[in-house]
Amino acid sequence: MALELNLQNKELTSDEIAKLAEMRKVCARRILLATSLASSGHPGGSLSTLDMLLVTYGCINHKPADSQWPGRDRVVMSIGHVSPGVYAVLAEYGYFSEEDFLTGFRRAGSGFPGHVERIVPGVEWDTGNLGQGLSTAVGMAQAFKMQGIDQKVICYMGDGEQQKGQISEAMRYANKYNLNNLIVIVDRNHVQICGSTEDVMDIDVAGLFEISGWNVLKLDDGHDTNKFFQAFGRAYNGEVAKGDKPTLIEAQTVMGKGISFMENLPKYHGSPLTQEQLTEAFQELGLENDFDKWAELRKKPVSTATKVKHVVRYPDIAAGEPITYESKTDCRSAYGNALYSLAQANNVEGTMRIAGISCDLEGSVKMGDFRKHSPSAFFEAGIQEHHAATMAAAISCEEVACFFSTFGVFAVSEVYNQNRISDINETNLKVVATHCGLDVGEDGPTHQGIDFIGLMRNYFRFSVYMPADPNQTDRVIRRAALDSGNVFVGMGRSKMDMVLAVDGSPFFGGDYRFTPGKGDWVRNGDAGTIITYGSVTPNVMAAWQKLKDEGISAAVLVMASVVPVDEAAIVEAARKGPILTVEDHHVDTGLGALVAMVMADNALATPFKRLGVSRYGSSGKPADLYADQGLDAAGIARSFREML
Ligand SMILES: Cc1ncc(C[n+]2csc(CCOP(=O)(O)OP(=O)(O)O)c2C)c(N)n1
């Protein structure tokens, strides 16, 4: 390895300082070349973080030849835009070659994207949307604590970035849960895109961390490798005032450090140098400008040889014994009971495999029994959903099945971009949202999430399950825990009747097992099919009975697996006859839209009607809200008749 620094030493030796200075020069050249070759990218912040990054990788536990060695410390680059600096340093430590980086940077399909991504050996998280990286680092640190693992997490952040509110959420959380295995380094260069941080939006960075309970180490020169080494060593070794708390190193730096005409200019946050400027910069570094040689090499087809598939460890989960409910109950309680049962089957102090996170709604989302059983795996994040969603996703990549629960509106639309970044990072998050749809009732339209399917379908790696009753909820939750990958499970608030088979037994009870991508034919019939899921299923069953009493025999297809959807079952229904979709969701962006798409894709035409929420609901009893939008049994039966 290029350099190994011993954190037991009080300071760097003069040889180490000289070596770091040499490495800086090599890396500064790479940063400038890469951005000029790509005609884009972020040289300024790369040069301001450079010295600290070089020392950090010299100090931490890692194995460049085995970039995903499980025992490694984690470095999360919340400032994903300083990718040139990160790649330059990782190349210096032997993760890949300089040629790989310089010929690939920012080229389509290459292994070196514009913002750091985990396809690059040594990168831990795809970032770029500022303000989320600390929550990711907190999640990793929390997962290590929960499992008794002694590894550190280091998070690099910008000073402009500190303006994001999610960071305050993460700060408070890390303090509350005593994450003393977490070190944050803020690159305090006082510059962001549109000017100085003081002009754009002034923030007392250290003060904010301080009042949130952190240790704060202020460094007057983040380019002084010896000073940074000492501060980093204190933080890493816990030689700080509050040994049980996380530590911030606020390091004063210079944007564009080392190239006289770049220093302190916002322009160079995101502008590469021209050819002439590059020559001038290289003269300052005492180097030749070999731009042309590299530009020639970049004409070769792009190489993908360095790309890695990031391995996330998902635990083997025991599903426990399914519970069958006979009498009216709510899906929320079935979720809470299933989660408790999963904790009993999987959580042993020291190897906790199921974690739960709520945002001041533990009682409403029924996580109480889980918390009592596994207090060290339950995390109350407060009303800080942005942080909680990101943190939960990071925990889910550390051999833990992590359940994040809150109301539908707060679990999906509130944190849409956080979940999107988790989706990009191929996490194993389990979002279980209660209080979806008009079924929320009296709390009114601000609380009635009716857009979750449309939003979730924008992601490429989220399954979406909407169980039809508490028995199906029990089986859906157990299945979600078994499978790796991102899963959303949505449910309403009210108590409901079980869906019964024709013989009167619970359809989803006993031996029923939920299979992703499979619909369930709950009733057969030849007049047409009602396709439904979730809270309105009892109304559909009542409508089925009404129609039957009138001599109309409808089939009922329950589509709890909305993503992936059971295309074959939809095609079968369309071939049989008319289709009515019924859902407690925006009528244009839910299951109805999906069924229409499947029919169009398969060139199938049949009488077809979509029933759903066609305007914001009001505040009132769910039954009245359903009747108001034609989603009660009478309305569903009427629509079916009209369609025929
Ligand atoms: C949420 C979000 N908003 C806006 C941006 C666009 N953006 C990228 S970098 C940046 C400025 C960051 O400033 P700072 O943290 O000081 O980084 P530095 O300029 O020092 O590299 C902005 C606004 C973004 N990436 N994410």
Image: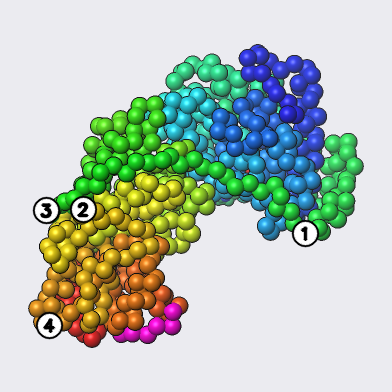
CA distance separating discs 3 and 4: 29 Å
Which badge, 3 or 1, is on the more N-terminal residue?
Answer: 1
Which comes sooner in the sequence, label 3 or label 4? Answer: 3
Which structural element holds mark 1? loop
Specify the amino acid type for callout 4. Answer: Gly
Q: Which mark is residue 510?
A: 2
The answer to whether residue 4 is seen in the rendering is yes
Is residue 604 a member of the stretch shown in magenta?
A: yes
Residue 255 shows in the view: no
In percent of the image, x 13 and y 78: which residue is there? 548
- Is residue 310 or residue 15 the one in the foreground? 310
The residue tagged with tag 4: helix, strand or loop? loop
Question: Which residue matches tag 3?
Answer: 327
In the depicted view, which residue is nearer to us: 170 or 192?
A: 170
- Residue at the limit of the structure toward the right, as seen here: 288
Within-10-Å neighbours for mark 1: few <14, some 14–19, many 20+: few
Check disc 1 and report the residue beneath it: 301
Look at the numbered discs 3 and 1 and tell me whether their residues touch, using CB distance below 8 Å.
no
Left or right, 274 with respect to 245, comes to right
The boundaries of the magenta stretch are: 602-608
Decide: few, some or many residues near mark 3? Use Cα within 10 Å; few <14, some 14-19, many ≥20.
few
